[in-house]
Image (cartoon, grey):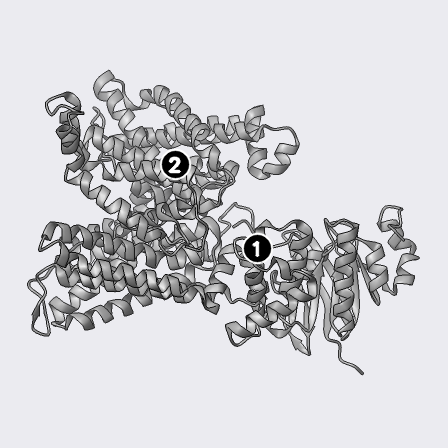
Amino acid sequence: MNKQIAIIALMAGVAAALPLMTGENPYFTGVMISVLMMAALSSAWNILGGYAGQYSFGHAAYFGAGAYTTLIFISRFNLNPLLSIVAGIIVAGIIALITGSIVFRLRGHYFGLASIAVAEIVRLSVLNFDFTGGAQGILISDVSLWGFDLNSKNPFYYGMLIVLVVTLGITLFLRKSKTGYYLQAIREDQDAAASLGINLSFYKNKALLISAALTSVLGSLYAVYIRFIDTTAVLDLRLSIEIILTAIIGGVGTLWGPVLGAVLLVPLAEMLRSNVIGDTLVKFGIVSASSGLGIFLKENLAHAHVLVYGIITVLCILYLPKGILGLFGRGK
Amino acid sequence: MNQHLLDIRHICKQFGGNAAVSDVSFSVDEKQIIGLIGPNGAGKTTLFNCITGFYPVTSGDIIFNNKKINSLRPDQVCHSGMARTWQTVKPLASLTVMENVMIGGFSVAKSIREAEDIATEQLLLVGLTDYAGKSAGSLPIGLKKKLELARVLATQPKLLLLDEICGGLNITETDTILSIIRDIRNKGATIVFIEHDMKAVTSLCDWIVVLNSGEKLAEGTPEEITHNPDVIAAYLGGSQNA
Amino acid sequence: MFFLQSLLSGILTGGVYALAGIGMSLVFGVMNISNFAHGDLMMLGMYLAYFAFTLLHIDPYVSLLLIIPISFLFGFLIEKVFIRQIIHHPHQNQILLTVGLGLIMSNSTLLAFTSDPKILTTSYSSSAINIFDGISLSVPLLLSFIVTCGITGILYMFLSKTTTGLALMATSQNREAAQLMGINVAKMSAIAFGLGTALAATAGALIAPTYYIHPMAGHSFLLKAFTICVLGGLGSVFGAAIGGIIIGIVEAMASTYLSTDWKDVVVFILFLAVLLFRPEGLFGKKGEQ
């Protein structure tokens, strides 16, 4: 346990120093923010999915709840950003409680489907109300907190890092607590767990609430960082799936699996999007820029990152079902 | 008049049109060991599931410790003092043996330390101390059954429901389990025992209840039951290991 | 007046939904798998119909003669190559495999044909028949419904009168028992998945004349198909047929009396209500979860 804490601290230290070491490179910082955010999102999901064994396919609902609530409070009610984030947590918590009361009675296939249904209801409702900006989304202008201008990237880099560290810390703490043991029992065999005195609903809801709250904070941070959100950006099923895939590929149910997944997949997606891969192939003479293949790559690789995710997912499920870290057992 | 620890009154359980359990009544007093026997499909496990809150009864009452517990959830039943093992063992596979038993212990323990202590004690009782760090899923069936027992004992139940704890075990393994149960019994436990092994049942039980096709066929002492013609007929003309 | 018009349109659309639902229900019954790529299979059917029409000049309904065998084969192969490997894996992994396959299908289509929506306009795309007193039925919808009835009838014959069909139904009822009776359950799985794919593709082809065709078109049908399956009872073909019609009607009514923006929300709320209050659906087996 102490070893794990030390590793988290070390990683946090390195990550904290990174922007200072690489100089003011906004592009790099931007990518790192995405990595940290996805690592935190997947780790938060992992508390419910990896430890309690309840795969929520609708986690975008909590991300969006945080994002929308925060921006609405900032733009319409001029509320302090930190308090707006708290408001986001409350809204996400309400959605989580409602969801939990419906879906946790259901087993197996039904649970996943129900979680999608809830998330889609949230998305469509937000899309249809003018109050939430409808299809145009919400745009805010410059934000400041206690006099500090929040227009640069660094505050959000550190914000995401803090949430990630907190999430990992909570995961570690849970693992060695009664709650953590109970969640894992639920994951392994719900009937056995119930027969041993475990109140299934209570513990599943507990895990969901923690997971939803953390996800909501990340949504709020994202919203204030980008300053524009719409349902496609923060409430889409694609986001929910991406969170799950990141955890699966890295190793669901392990501490570092989701982080590893994010560290591998987010830069890969970025490289595809910005055509780094295509350019590299050309540079090394493997592909000629003017050939059919060259042109095809140049035009299309940018859109291919989801396709690559799909291929990696299929390969992972078939050949590495416990993810990369799963090869080393659950301890990690 | 002594109050029974467990009182089953006229339990019926229907699944659609199928009556899995019909009008079954019996009672269990403290420190008794009751055997629940009957051919396959007689409704024994269904009855256990009804008693422990996994199935809602269609009609009838379950009175435990003077309280009607019909509507309790399985976890609540455990907390009220009644615990059960499973016919097909349910180890928490990717957790260690120690962790499995600790989870049982958490239902009464107030701290991790206490749960560990309870678990250590139970592992010693069943003879699994050397396996404490092994993953539960990797154990052979005989040890999985011991684990199931240790885990349920860690919940410190007043009444223990054992569902075919000897099922799938060879003679040596069966003897080991039975001697553990004798130990538990000597410490004053109350047990209801579903079992097919008639030798085990007759040697351990004070009283036997026989189910057939969901109904109670007979009840009595082991002596009475092994000589009951209806019971012998129900087991298709053979008396098993009598 | 609105009521009757909505009801009829709903029934007609519901017929096509029913096809998608039946396909999914078959797969679920025989293989116990939730196929999250089902919507994308419908989308492939839409594109097949589009290209049959624009390149080969075959009418969508006629192109079914091509689409059905091609998609059956496609599904059959996918089952053998991918799905079969994970038949004993935990169900979450099964779902994720189908998610991955779906992503591959939709994004390959995206790369190949871009996200510009394609429109399949036949000569009768916007025709309508007036039946009486201001009620009109869209011709494509009517034709789709008729074709759907025909296909459902053939499917019913197949499932209840042929050896393979009966074997499929037996496997769906109880896989272990079927295996013990000598049925090759692995082959049944492949056939079921092939059939499910063919039905999904057919549904896609049938609605192609009335929807925008684009790579992500399948996604909105996925949850609807699940709703239909659950409403009808997972594994019940007849249930899925009824479920499809009901969802078609619910959607049409919601569109008319609330607004088109909210019609999906109503369907999804219905979905949650069914899961909560009658998880076995209308015709499913109780206790199956």
Tell me whether marks 2 and 1 sit on the same chain. no
Seen at 35% across and 42% down, the residue is: C222
C148, B215: nearer the viewer: B215
Residue B176 horizontal side relative to residue A51, left or right: right
**In the image, residue B114 above or below residue A317:** below
Give the numbered dot on residue B134: 1
The type of residue carrying mark 2 is Ala
Helix, strand or loop at label 2? It is helix
2 or 1: mark nearer the eye: 1
**In the image, residue C189 above or below residue C270:** above
Give the numbered dot on residue C20: 2
Q: Among all residues in the image, which is located at the extreme bottom?
A: B1
Residue C281 horizontal side relative to residue C99, left or right: right
Label 2 neighbourhood size at 10 Å, few (<14), some (14-19), many (20+)?
many
Q: Chain of mark 2?
A: C
**In the image, residue C88 above or below residue B96:** above
